[in-house]
Amino acid sequence: MQATRTFLGRGLAAAAALPLLAVALTACGYGSQAKDDSVAPAAKGEKIGGLDTVKIGYFPNLTHATALVGHQEGIIQKELGGTQLSASTFNAGPSEIEALNAGSIDIGFIGPSPSINGFARSKSKSLRIIGGSASGGVKLVVNPEKIKTLDDVKGKKIATPQLGNTQDVAFLNWISEKGWKVDAETGKGDVSVVRTENKVTPNAYLSGSVDGAWVPEPTASKLVSDGAKVLLDESDLWPDKKFVITNIIVSQKFLKEHPAVVEAVLRGTVKTNAWINANPDKAKESANAKLQELTGKPLPPKVIDPAWKSIRFTDDPLAATLDAQADHAVKAGLLQQPDLAGIYDLGPLNKVLEAEGGSAVSDAGLGVK
């Protein structure tokens, strides 16, 4: 029951909406610049298909821990053999999609909103979702002195990362299901939706500018460390408590030209997720070590410990929840109904899963024909 995604359109034609969406997506991280990652395990062995390098992009976020850990531990590189993994990090969805379209990266870890946006803007020609990575990790946290129950949210000021972003649409959908009214564009109504960058939200909370926030990890746990309380975990609104927060995408050109490399990367991500789930404490340390390398400092235990527990790492892209998220954005008036047919190609992933003794995952009818 919630909307996790970003397509901004608010009754405008899709073409007019998408540039605004691109602005909103910059709130997915803590900046907008791509960063070349110079520290990488060395390639060893035979190159796959003679390819020297595969360029992979991801965010320095806990919800991208499959990439963080898979890179840090060399699990993905091991599957690539002599083909070198070259990584770049991004802090915003649009810049990663632009990099994919320009050929600056071949494969990316990214949220559902920019995946849909990139697919729709290219008229279904730019990318495919080839796997899942993470689910969950989004919470409504509030000032316990002002808000004690869900009904108390009415009349309060609640932060979301930005107009039309994944969490913003989720919150607007939740408000609608409560029967309350809010103008999606201005954020004014029965609840004041205050669009605030994640890096600014903790200070806004401490100053009293907002009474709470619907935000992803680790921002939610940072607010809790500052005295906020978790009022609602978004996972509780979804069937089986699962919804997509991070996908794996690939450029269609690269998928066509280098299918064996794509398959090798997916073997690496499947093995990484298995290792994360079998060794959660070691994996958390590994992810934090990579974050320290990329951002300059690790997350403190009081933030990373609860944040880590709220994220599930999964190979399943949870395609039905992405489709539902699109519907929520349409319902909120932020998106014209997109045609998502063909956004998934899960053939390579299901081949890997079968070889690893796992079960095939579904594209919810949105796969290539």
Image (tube, grey):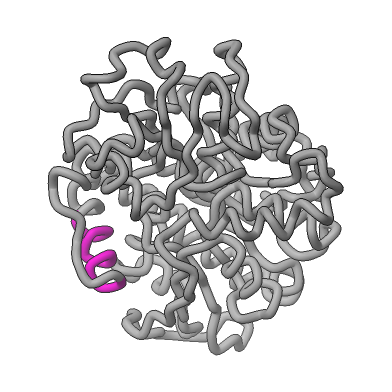
**What residue do we see at 48% from left, 49% from top?**
133
Residue 133 seen anywhere in this rendered image of the structure? yes
Quadrant of residue 249 within the rendered picture: bottom right
- Magenta range: 285-294
Location of residue 37 with respect to 368 vertically, above or below: below
Per the picture, the main secondary structure of the magenta-coloured stretch is: helix
Location of residue 212 with respect to 149 vertically, above or below: below
Residue 300 lies within the magenta run: no
| Residue 204, x across and y down, in percent | 31, 44
Residue in front for this viewpoint, 140 or 297 = 140
Question: In the rendered view, does 227 fall on the left or right side of 267?
Answer: left
**What residue do we see at 27% from left, 43% from top?**
308
**What residue do we see at 59% from left, 72% from top?**
261
| Residue 243, x across and y down, in percent | 52, 33
| Residue 127, x across and y down, in percent | 72, 62
Residue in front for this viewpoint, 183 or 9 = 183
Location of residue 115 with respect to 181 vertically, above or below: below
